[in-house]
Amino acid sequence: MEHWIGKIAIFTGASSGIGLAIAKALVQNDVVVIGFARRKSKMQSEMQNVKGKNKGKFYAFECDVSKPDSIEQAFEWVKNNFETVPILVNNAGVVINFKFMDSSRSDWKRLFDVNVLGYIDCTKRAARMMLDSNIEGYIININSIAGQDIIFFPGYTFNFYSASKFASVAATDITQKELYGSKIRVTSISPGLVSTEIFDANNFNVDTIKDLPMLEADDIANAVIYVIGTPQCVHITELIIRPFGEVKYKC
């Protein structure tokens, strides 16, 4: 990680769960993290006592990745204040607890606006800054095992979440291919079931999964630190992380 000390990392969805854990880990490893999320005050509150050994800092910027204008304003602020960005972690994501037949176009649009189009828009803007600055860069997309298999947990309805994650995994692969020959590495990290507030926040019955093997948010943070800490000659294109003992529930 020494290579990234004092460097800038943009992080979406940094106010809770996996995003918050990774933001803390990066700051503690002396990376300057800029968190993008709708809940700016929550980011500031959660990160106020997190310090790096020397250069690690945290800045919060209110950004809704489902809205192109909000993304544009956020990246313009970064450009004006920091000139460029070597690291982007696309983590923001949503899930809805409706059956397909009970959901609407607005529900599906919300899933794809955040889980796919938000990824693409942030990636395009960060990659352009990296290319224009001719710097070594790293883009990490936090995807999901739901983008590898259509999954089913008893009592849960994920609607088109898997469809959005299949699309984000494909978008990562496309980005890798289009940036071939540049100094930018792109990695897809797909966790299995992670213990975060996302289920409570979307009215899932957590009793149905409380006894299932789960990862912790810190497990994913450790994976991100490992991936970006590899030398530039190493390109981990995809990393799938499952909790030990997991049973694959498929439709």
Image (tube, helix red, strand yellow):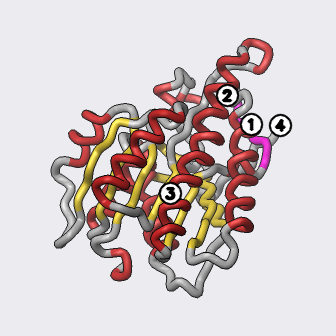
Disc number for residue 156: 2
Give the quarter of the image for residue 97. Answer: top right
Disc number for residue 251: 4
Q: Give the distance between the C-alpha atoms of the residues marked 2 and 3, in whole angstroms.
A: 35 Å
Q: Give the distance between the C-alpha atoms of the residues marked 2 and 4, in whole angstroms.
A: 11 Å
- Of mark 1 and mark 3, the one earlier in the sequence is 3
Q: State the SS at label 3.
A: helix
Q: Amino acid at mark 3?
A: Ala
Q: State the SS at label 1.
A: loop
What residue is shown at x 57% (from left), y 41% (from top)?
Answer: 118
Work out whether 243 lies above or below 131. Answer: above
Answer whether residue 155 is visible to the viewer in this image. Answer: no
- Of mark 2 and mark 3, the one earlier in the sequence is 3
- Of mark 4 and mark 1, the one earlier in the sequence is 1
Q: Give the distance between the C-alpha atoms of the residues marked 1 and 2, in whole angstroms.
A: 7 Å
Cβ–Cβ below 8 Å for labels 2 and 3?
A: no
Answer whether residue 215 is visible to the viewer in this image. Answer: yes
Please identify the quadrant where the N terminus is shown. Answer: bottom left
Disc 1: which residue: 152
